[in-house]
Image (tube, coloured by chain):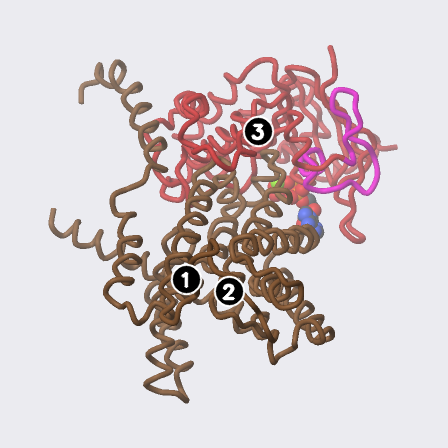
Chain colours: A red, B brown
């Protein structure tokens, strides 16, 4: 398999705080990888480092073998890295449809045009509508984003990322804050994405993780704690100790953790 | 609606409606003729007030240029007078020092020079946002003013450039005592500028500016070259402000370093907020009402007129957040709702 995205020895400090430590991670074409870890483990930070929202203190990020560590965030997006945000980052004052059109317009370069009316490009509107239909947002196409309930806004969050036609898609807790009645829709959508896209998903719901992921990376205190298939992770006692919690007693976990590191 | 309707007619219907909405948005609506009718009407109804009218038209143009960057792209600036000033001084120096007084070509020269000013300062400053940007834009205007003061041998300092000689329009029309010709001239230039701004607003580029205003983080994430978009819009706005400044200098045949004053930058922002930002006609309503209020207040209370303007602004911000046009919309909607 070919690696689309590679991270090598990535580090990031905030002052004295080491939020990312020596992280190595590879996403192959069509990868379905989950990134799990307790709150504050540095999962979102890692996504920011991959997209270029943050620059690493040291280490490299490679896209299709090319070093993009110094490449701007926008340029990385244009080269095929898309993300969604843990907390919605939407264009709240304009319609849902225009949110999507904007992503398409920036992807295709249509937004460089200062003269032709935006409404004249039927192709863009049709494409945007396609994403809305696949996310069952078509009925809300003309509503302002800020008027939508939170669950629907989460879908717009994903629709924008899809409109970027990414090769690498980073989903930061896509179903967070959504009632379970609606979160199914979001997860179904994620399940049915193009198998060619490499996907990294951050998710706290272990049922979702085990259902969706083919590989899982466990991040603890900024470092990769362990990596493996869902089965391996499910039966890894140390992971249970630090992340899945309850089943193992604290004492035992500490002992095993020490063995693991020593 | 039956379930079968939803699956058969529904999707295409929705798509058609959505497309129609987007396609229709940029079409010129009937109501848009109103401001132009008013501008024409003023000429015939108040023939002895066209000199003042010209200044109102210039203020509209200045506010319109600010709307492009403040209302659409969300760039807050307190230094927009810098570009108005560059435009005014282009005319002053060309006509008083270099012996060239042809009005229309001077507008182009002013647009180019102010545009270059916008390009250079924008390229440096538009990495910043919010309060930092506010201070830096303010400082830019002050720097220009101080530079003008330092070279007062050329600029005439705060006393103004003496001996500006503006040639006849098209070699025929003089700036007559009543200012009739200049009113028409300014109205035509305003119309051309307006068409340009309107095109930009409804273009995909204009949509990207709105995106930057609404959520700059997301714009970076979807691959938008944010800095470049901002610099381009800033350059265009600067050029338009430059044209407004040039018209000011041509119509009054007079310019002092006062054009760079903080007052001037603040005033144009007040006008825009008064009318409503990001709504294209906010500049028209705001600048007109501001100018009329200023004129009336300063006649009625020569000492306290600024208090009156301040009061109007406070009332606007408290009760008409989206400006007078926003208020107008809300009221119209209220009556439409209560009728049905
Ligand atoms: N800009 C910043 N400045 C300082 N500290 C930061 C910054 N961003 C994140 N941190 C810290 O880095 C650590 C990791 O944060 P991050 O948001 O990456 O965690 P996370 O794994 O995504 O957590 P969660 O599951 O709660 O989303 C936290 O302790 C956080 O306080
Ligand atoms: Mg997080």
Residue at the location (42% across, 40% down)? A150
| Chain ID at mark 2 | B
Q: How far apart are the alpha carbons under marks 1 and 3?
A: 41 Å
Q: Is residue A60 magenta?
A: yes
| Chain ID at mark 3 | A
Q: Residues within 10 Å of mark 2 (few under 14, many from 20)?
A: many
Asked if A41 appears above or below B273 in the picture, the reply is above
Query: In this orientation, does residue B231 appear?
Result: yes
Q: Relative to residue B24, is residue B98 drawn left or right?
A: right
Q: Determine which quarter of the picture holds residue B271.
A: bottom left
Q: How far apart are the alpha carbons under marks 2 and 3?
A: 40 Å
| Chain ID at mark 1 | B
Residue at the disc numbered 1? B182
Instruction: Give coordinates of residue B91: x percent, y percent.
Output: 58, 62
Q: Secondary structure at mark 1?
A: helix
Residue at the disc numbered 2? B250
Please report the bounds of the magenta region as a residue range: A47-70
Upstream in the sequence, badge 2 or badge 1? 1
Residue at the location (46% across, 21% down)? A188
User: Which part of the image, by quadrant, shows the N terminus of chain B?
Assistant: top left
Q: How far apart are the alpha carbons under marks 2 and 1?
A: 9 Å
Instruction: Give coordinates of residue A144: x percent, y percent.
Output: 37, 41
CB within 8 Å, label 2 to label 1: yes
Q: Relative to residue B98, is residue B254 drawn left or right?
A: left
């Amino acid at each position: 398999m070919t690696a689309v995205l590679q991270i090598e020895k990535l580090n990031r400090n905030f002052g004295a705080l080491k939020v990312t430590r020596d992280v190595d991670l590879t996403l192959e074409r069509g990868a379905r990888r989950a990134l799990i870890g307790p709150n504050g483990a540095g999962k979102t930070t890692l996504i920011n480092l991959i997209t270029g929202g943050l620059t690493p203190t040291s280490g490299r990020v490679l896209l299709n073998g090319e070093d993009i560590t110094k490449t701007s965030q926008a340029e990385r997006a244009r080269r095929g890295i898309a993300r969604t945000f843990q907390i919605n980052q939407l264009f709240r004052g304009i319609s849902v449809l225009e949110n999507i059109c904007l992503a398409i317009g920036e992807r295709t370069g249509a937004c460089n045009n200062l003269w032709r009316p935006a409404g004249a490009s039927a192709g863009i509107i049709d494409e945007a509508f396609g994403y809305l239909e696949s996310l069952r947002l078509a009925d809300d196409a003309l509503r302002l984003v800020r008027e939508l309930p939170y669950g629907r806004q989460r879908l717009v969050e994903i629709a924008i990322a899809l409109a970027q036609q990414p090769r690498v898609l980073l989903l930061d807790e896509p179903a967070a804050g959504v009632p379970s009645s609606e979160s199914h829709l979001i997860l179904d959508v994620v399940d049915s994405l193009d198998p060619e896209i490499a996907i990294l998903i951050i998710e706290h719901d272990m049922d979702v993780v085990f259902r969706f992921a083919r590989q899982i990376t466990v991040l603890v205190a900024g470092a990769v704690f362990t990596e493996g298939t869902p089965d391996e992770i499910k039966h890894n006692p140390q992971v249970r100790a630090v992340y899945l919690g309850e089943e193992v007693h604290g004492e035992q976990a500490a002992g095993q953790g020490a063995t693991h590191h020593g | 609606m039956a379930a079968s309707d939803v699956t058969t007619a529904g999707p295409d219907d929705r798509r058609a409606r959505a497309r129609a909405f987007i396609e229709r948005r940029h079409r010129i609506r009937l109501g848009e003729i109103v401001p132009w009718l008013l501008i024409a009407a003023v000429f015939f109804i108040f023939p002895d007030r066209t000199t003042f009218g010209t200044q109102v038209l210039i203020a509209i143009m200045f506010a319109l240029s600010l709307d492009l960057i403040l209302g659409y792209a969300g760039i807050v600036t307190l230094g927009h007078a810098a570009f108005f000033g560059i435009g005014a001084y282009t005319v002053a120096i060309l006509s008083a020092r270099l012996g060239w007084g042809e009005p229309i070509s001077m507008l182009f020269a002013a647009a180019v020079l102010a545009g270059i000013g916008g390009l250079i300062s924008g390229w440096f400053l538009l990495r910043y946002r919010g309060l930092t940007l506010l201070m830096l834009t303010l400082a830019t205007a002050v720097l220009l003013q101080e530079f003008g003061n330092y070279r007062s041998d050329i600029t005439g300092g705060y006393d103004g450039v003496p001996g500006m000689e503006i040639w006849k329009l098209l070699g025929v029309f003089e700036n007559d005592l009543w200012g009739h010709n200049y009113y028409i001239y300014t109205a035509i230039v305003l119309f051309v500028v307006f068409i340009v701004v309107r095109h930009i607003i409804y273009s995909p580029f204009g949509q990207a500016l709105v995106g930057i205003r609404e959520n700059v983080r997301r714009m970076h994430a979807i691959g938008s070259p944010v800095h470049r978009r901002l610099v381009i819009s800033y350059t265009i706005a600067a050029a338009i402000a430059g044209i407004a400044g040039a018209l000011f200098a041509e119509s009054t045949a007079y310019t002092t370093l006062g054009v760079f004053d903080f007052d001037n930058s603040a005033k144009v922002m007040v006008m825009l907020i008064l009318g409503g930002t990001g709504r294209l006609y906010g500049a028209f309503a705001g600048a007109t009402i501001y100018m009329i209020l200023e004129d009336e207040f300063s006649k009625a209370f020569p000492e306290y007129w600024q208090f009156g303007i301040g009061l109007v602004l406070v009332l606007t911000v408290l009760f008409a957040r989206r400006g007078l046009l926003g208020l107008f919309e809300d009221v119209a909607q209220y009556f439409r709702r209560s009728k049905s």
